[in-house]
Image (cartoon, rainbow, N blue to C red):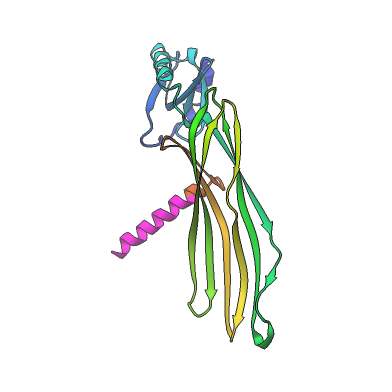
Amino acid sequence: MKTRLLAIMSLLCPLLAGAEIRTFTNSAGKKIQAELIGMDEGVAVLKLGNGRSAKVPLKSLSEGDQAYVKSWHEENKNKVRAGDLRLTIEKNTERLKESPSGKKDKGNKNKISRTETSYTCTLENLSAKSIEGIKVDYVIYERVSVRGGEDGSETRTEETSTSAEIDNLKPNGTVEFTSDSEISEEGETTKKGVSESRREKVVGFVVTILTDGVEILKQSHPDNFLERLEGDAKRRADREKKSR
């Protein structure tokens, strides 16, 4: 049992700011910094700095840590935590029939292809308690690129936000919901000698799960999309700082 805790020592890295970090010690005196996120049948669930969780037998920890885990469990056993929920996101796309629009005579043409995108989310309650008053906020991100035309070229990101509510998610229960559909277009237009290409593409999806107004879980599709958003925000901030 002792080796279970020893095996995760190499995974240490700085933990998220604001988390309740504790230095846990096993019976052999080895230490690890982690956040306690749950306890189940004599096993403490620790969140490591890389975001992964590790299950550590309670009896392999020091007496002080065992007392801390039991006290924490009594205080938090009815609270909803990220470890109580599991969210799975599946992207759905359907290529719609190409629809030419406008006349093709006199050198004019306008041909557009469309793609319909939605996301199916499956939310599972992994705990033994009912979770009430769940609010789901989700955002679909679409990148719009325009090249040529009378107004020049530009690329921008547009957001479509929606909310939903789940009254009660029973113990070990599952609920499925699907986002609104987003129609993306791609095409080229030639009119009176002016050519323009336009592309709208859904590039990401972010879901935030809240209970009582408190954020419990945030997840994206693709998995690295939240990191990409943070990187874009940092680059914008750096550009604005340099331009001052």
Q: Residue at horizontal 51%, vertical 14%? A: 42
Do we see residue 143 in this rendering? yes
Q: Is residue 160 left or right of residue 65?
A: right
Residue 116 vs 4, above or below: the answer is below
Q: Residue at horizontal 44%, vertical 26%? A: 79
Q: Residue at horizontal 57%, vertical 57%? A: 202
Residue 168 vs 203, above or below: the answer is above
- The picture quadrant where one finds residue 18 is top left
**Observer-nearest of 116 and 60:** 116
The furthest residue to the front? 167
Question: What secondary structure predominates along the stretch shown in magenta?
Answer: helix
Residue 176 horizontal/vertical position (percent) = 61, 39
The furthest residue to the right? 97
**Residue 132 falls inside the magenta stretch:** no
Do we see residue 7 in this rendering? no
Q: Is residue 8 left or right of residue 67?
A: right
Residue 68 horizontal/vertical position (percent) = 39, 17
User: What is the magenta range?
Assistant: 228-244
Q: Is residue 40 left or right of residue 70?
A: right
Residue 167 horizontal/vertical position (percent) = 52, 34
The furthest residue to the bottom? 106
Check the picture and name the quadrant holding the N terminus.
top right
Residue 87 vs 138, above or below: the answer is above
